[in-house]
Amino acid sequence: MSMNSLHDLYVDELKDLYSAENQLLKALPRMAKKAAAEELKAAFSEHVEVTRKQVERLDTIFAGLDVAPKGKKCKAMEGLIEEGKEVIEAEGHPAVIDAALIASAQRVEHYEMAGYGCVRTFAALLGYDEAAGLLQQTLDEETKADKSLTKLAETIINIEAEGADGDEDEEEVDDEETEDETEVDDEKTAPKKAKGTMKKTVKS
Ligand code: FE
Ligand code: FE
Ligand code: ZN
Ligand code: FE
């Protein structure tokens, strides 16, 4: 590709995001399927719908530029999804798998946030105000998705992952201990009870 103008770069970056979003559309349902916690399943499923809208916004922008959105594969998203696939194929404690899914998904969101932040700025610099607005909307959605994932990590994952280090059968076996091993009805207490190490891993 030629990169002699900011416009060239803008189009190239938009194509990269278009490819990224479309790859993600295929990957998200698999992540939803793998997730154990209902809240996490729901978050992934909801992001499928959000992502469809984001693709539509990109279609609108490409139509305005009179450019076809094809011709580029986002290799970074391909790699991120590849790593996510390792989690999908992994076996282990459901809460730990959920934490790993969140870690993968947050990498994806941060990649998208970087991409949309750039194209939004390019659009504004190039005087494409409407496109800049659409891209900002998507950027806000990605930011929101990222924050929701952090919140899920803090509220549903940590407490369930307690006692998950090593003993895979523990969740089934110990019925006597009902207080802190049971399901998370009380989300507010979860962060306090969570193990510091687990929390740090998920949040970073
Ligand atoms: Fe997206
Ligand atoms: Fe890319
Ligand atoms: Zn996204
Ligand atoms: Fe997203």
Image (cartoon, rainbow, N blue to C red):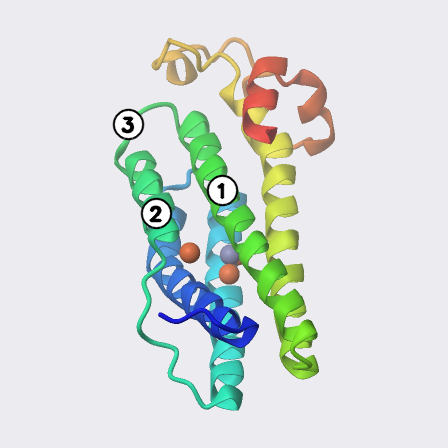
Mark 3 against mark 2, which lies toward the viewer?
A: 2
List the single residue furthest toward the left: 89
Q: Nearer the viewer, mark 1 or mark 3?
A: 1
The residue labelled by disc 2 is: 81
Between 53 and 93, the residue placed more toward the observer is 53
Tell me the residue that label 1 is attached to. Answer: 107
User: Residue under circle 3?
Assistant: 91
- In terms of image quadrants, where is residue 182? top right
**Residue type pointed to by label 2:** Ile
Residue 60 can be seen, yes or no: yes
Check disc 3 and give the amino acid type.
Answer: Glu
Question: Where does residue 59 sit, x and y in percent of width and height?
Answer: 47, 81
Residue 183 in sight in this render? no
Quarter of the image containing the N terminus?
bottom left
Q: Quadrant of residue 122?
A: bottom right
- Beta carbon of the mark 1 residue lies under 8 A of ligand 3: no
Residue in view at x 38 percent, y 44 percent:
80
Q: Is residue 150 left or right of residue 51?
A: right
Q: Which image quadrant shows ligand 2?
A: bottom left
Which comes before the other along the chain, label 1 or label 3?
Answer: 3
